[in-house]
Image (tube, helix red, strand yellow):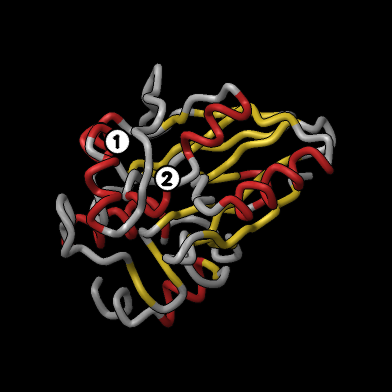
Amino acid sequence: MVQIKQFTFNPFQVNTYVLYDATGECAIIDASCYEKHEKKEFSDFIKGNGLKPVLQLLTHCHIDHMLGSRFISKSFRLKPLTHKDSLPFLENSKEYGKVFGFDVDKPVMPDVFIDDGDILQFGRQELKVLHTPGHAAGSLCYHHEAENLVFVGDVLFQGSIGRTDLPTGDHDRLIKSIFQKLTVLPDDTRVFPGHGPVTSIVEERTANPYLTGIY
């Protein structure tokens, strides 16, 4: 059984998730800890529970979702995994950070990139990669099929969807991604977004005003 610890970090209130099981291995999704006390809170949880991070995953590379990526890389010798289309965001992250008032170092770069359909493993768990562009180039979701969980970054929120007015955003493409990759999941799939509360596929398919009545 997978356990989930959710943190909410930085002024943009980004959800960082730690997924782990009885083996102690864990996956970190969207390391967004920025302030010193946030980094300490995160490290204390990892150490206090005897966890071993083996995956650092980014749903997308907007600066608010990767403020802690370098910290995680240095602390646990763990390079991030993301889609190749996110590379420009990574390469220019220091400049993007300045725009929003963040003093960040350039993140550690991935050795490899991941794409739609890839299977990632930690402990006894598997996550399937879903390529879901539209909010940003290279956006990814991570589906834990065995327990009906999906981690969606800024693709889908409770009652809303990701904004598409930033560079590489595309509203039509986002809607297509949601319908092709997310709303086809089982109704009881729990949806863990990059901001805000947990929701479900059935709730968003039937009540999200951005999705109802489209098809």
Marks 2,1: beta carbons within 8 A: yes
Give amino acid for label 1.
Answer: Leu
Residue 58 sits above or below residue 207 on the image: above
Give how far across and how far down residue 180 sits, in percent: 32, 53
Residue 114 sits above or below residue 135 on the image: above
Residue 129 sits above or below residue 141 on the image: above
N-terminal of the pair, mark 2 or mark 1, is 2
**Horizontal side of residue 34 vs 21, given as left or right:** left
Residue positioned most to the top: 111
Give amino acid for label 2.
Answer: Met
**Horizontal side of residue 114 vs 56, given as left or right:** left
Q: In which quarter of the image is the N terminus?
A: top right
Q: Which mark is residue 66?
A: 2
Q: Which of 26 and 125 is in front in this view?
A: 26
Give how far across and how far down residue 155 sits, in percent: 36, 59
Q: In which quarter of the image is the C terminus?
A: bottom left
Q: Which of 63 and 153 is in front in this view?
A: 63
Q: Name the residue under label 1.
A: 90
Q: Residues within 10 Å of mark 2 (few under 14, many from 20)?
A: many
- Helix, strand or loop under label 1: helix
Give how far across and how far down residue 158 sits, in percent: 46, 74
Give how far across and how far down residue 14 sits, in percent: 48, 60
How many dots with numbers? 2
